[in-house]
Image: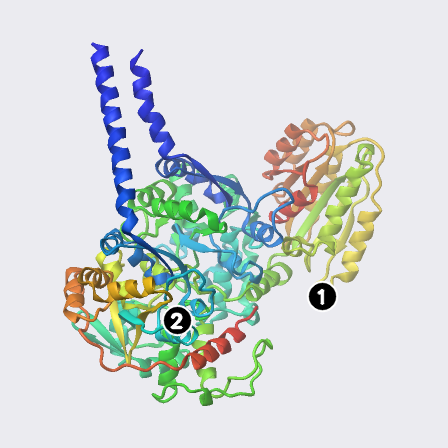
Amino acid sequence: MKRPLNILLTVLLLLGLGFGIYVSVRGQFSARSVVTVRGVIGSEKEDFFRDPEVVAALLKRQFRVEYVKAGSREIAGRDLNGLDFAFPAGVPAADALKKRVKPQQTYDVFYTPVVVASFQPILKILEQNNLAKTQGSYGTLDMQALLRVMEAGTRWTALKGSAAYPSSRSVLVSTTDVRKSNSAAMYLALVSSILNGGQVAQASDLDQNFTSPNGLQEGTQGTLMPQVAPLFLRQGYQESSSAGPFEDYQALGAGKTPLVNIYESQFLAAAREKTLPQGAVLLYPQPGIFTKHVLIPLTPAGARLGEALTSDPELQRLAARAGYRTRDASLFMAQVKAAGVSVPASILDTADLPSQEVMEAMIGNIEAQYPK
Amino acid sequence: MRLLPALLLPLLLAACTKPETALTVLGGSELADLKPILEDVAKSTGVKLDITYTGTLDGTEQLLTGPASGQAAPDLVWFSSARYLQLQGGLKGRLLASEKIMLSPVVLGVKASDAKKWGWSSGKVSWKDVAARAASGELKYGMTNPAASNSGLSALIGVVAALSGKGDAITASDVTAPELKGFFRGQALTAGSSGWLAEAYVRDQAKLNGLINYESVLLSLNAGGKLNEPLTLVYPEDGLITADYPLLLLNKDRQPEYAKLVAALRSPDIQRRIMNETRRRPVNPAVALSSAFPAGLNIELPFPGSAEAVNAVLTAYLQDTRRPANTIFVLDTSGSMGGERMASLKAALLGLSGTDTSLTGRYAGFASRERVTFIPFSSDVNPAQTTEIGAGDKAAALSQLSQQVTALSPGGGTNIYGALQAAYTQAGQAPAGRYTSIVLMTDGESNEGPSAREFEDFYNGLPAAAKAVKTFTILFGDGSKDAMNQIATLTGGRTFDGTKDLQGAFKQIRGYQ
């Protein structure tokens, strides 16, 4: 009785082994025509490039993408030897790279607005204080009014209707570390332009004869930065994980981060994965600001990847599914609807970005004021 | 029987495709309760964790100074909080990734009857209320030493932030709220680790009203069946600080294993097990909080943005706001202590008197307002030498202590229990309001003076105040482990192993003083 079973098991095992070898060899043969392209990407896009469907869609176009992650601000300055493309977040980083490598063409693959994630009870309080408005299932934030409240150091308990959120902490938007991350830099671009009277900050708005308290920086003070820098410095300890304070928003909720500056794409991706906290709501700052994700090719293979990411309908659909706004707005809106969220189809009132040099000078100014 | 090879083969193949890699981890001792979960994660991911347990500040120092020669730096770091670590400029660029694994706020547990009496059962309690009850002497609580343990540091930062009245993160200039001293007047028990604090609370619960610890530890105490009265968990409305247990990657070559590990630990199944078995909250929002946790809104206080500010808070606590310590060192100077042993004892005590300028040494050193007594003994018990360190400049007092240490000289027998009796007599005469503890360092077995039995009778006959003083024993040289444990157990103290690192043992005990 035992022998036939023994033989059967052995046969099954051999069959299984043979099939495994077949699959693996076949994979290697078909892989020959596939080109491996290597690049450096802003860490926020890792989820997109790791998505198995994106990997498959790229493979269909004969690409295998290998990447290293880096902060978008860091990408502009790093060694690009042996890479086919760079894919930072934000136009400032893309501009700096363009100046350096002078590509024939660049690719605006997708974009996403910078938004503020919050909670329904918080939105209600903001609304009662004329700081926000509910628009269907999302809200809009009056940034000018909110900045006045934040600059004055107003506490939540001092706002009308704060019983639902009796926190004696100051009203402040949590951001990632502006020294490291693009989403915080976008917030910096936005608030600097509003505090500059609606004018994009220029080098002339920053004083040239300034020495920071810790002596690290000279130059770039003026009247603008003393208003802008505290919005970052007053936050205290800032998360250094890739997800930054959005992770706190998801895990710890309103008690830790009543208002958190994020990319719209992060929120939409979380909505699709059903990892939003209870009562989560998106607030659109007015004016708002966009982050474009621009691919800078460094080799012809990198250019072909940029072309594929921009024009392949399947890849654009997957980008929309990952929460990014694509050239074809209907593609994006369909994916948002599938995730069970509603967002504005277009964002009209937007602030422009300062030049890369001014951005660097502003970040440098804040960096110089961090205590050691 | 022939079936066996056929059955084994697939198993062997499976084992080949998933070889177990071991990653080295520098981790907090409170991770010990994750052991069964981590074993299952190792089975499913093939990634095993080899954890070396240490305190947060100790671990930070180890990372800053680098591994001992011949040892590799750990692949991962896993403490209940990495905020202090992340603020160290010296570690810039070395912490490659950080992912939170689980959550536990640091809160106050108060005996249910007290909570009811003070109207704390139904929420709406602020740190100011807690400080007032402590200042009036009604609330006696346990809390770990903030320089040794993260739960104490989180509580301290939270209390300072809440009492500062500031809406933003505190800075180095915010550390002196007048209520702070009142708050710490109620600290009747301290410890170098959160786990030991919980054990000590169980032993001393009749004399205390509660303790500050992780929510997970307090919920476990309530479920553990060792409390005479359950604890009501108080979540101060002006805010608290939550431990988020981030797993940090140090070794870039271990990125793939790290990613696998994080994915497994944050998977809904493991998150649910962490919640149910260790009573920590999940970080994965896909896992709903069970009814074992209160559902209310917990306002989180901002953590300072610089190491400078944290250091200022710690220094102010140790030198200025904590209950001043009354520390009695019972020091063996018998003949066997000659040579290298005496040299290492002197080095350890001189380190506490100011020569150890390392990160941990700075916080372990004798503090302003501390009262330090040396009782050297051999066959006889020498007269106690007491030094009062004033509130101002410490230099004169520290130099006096250094001279007393330098003057120690070996010779004679070992009268352990006679010396301990002298220490307890001394402890009974301590000025009120001080936190008194005894350290016993001996390198041999008692061969003169009273017996262990006689000491026990003496101890049991002491008045309550003296009996409450704990003795921390150091195992050294040819000292008897049993005798040291017996003294520690009798008095509610703890034994520390100084055989390999005497200075390290003295510094660790400082967390319990």
Give the side of residue B29 with respect to residue A303, left or right: right
**Nearer-the-camera pick, A107 or A323:** A107
Q: Position of residue B201 (x, y in %)?
A: 50, 43
Instruction: Classify 10 Å Cα crowding around label 1: few (below 14), some (14-19), many (20 and above).
Output: few
* Marks 1 and 2 share the same chain: no
Question: What residue do we see at 35% from left, 72% from top?
Answer: A90
At mark 2, the secondary structure is helix
> Would residue B369 appear left or right of B200 to someone viewing this image?
right
Question: Which quadrant of the structure image shows residue A152?
Answer: bottom left
Amino acid under disc 1: Gly
Provide the residue designation for mark 1: B392
In this rendered view, identify the residue nearer to me: B487 or A215. Answer: A215
What residue do we see at 36% from left, 74% from top? A186
Mark 2 Cα within 10 Å, few/some/many (few <14, many 20+)?
Answer: many
Task: Tell me if I can see residue A25 in this picture.
Answer: yes
Give the quarter of the image for residue A3. Answer: top left
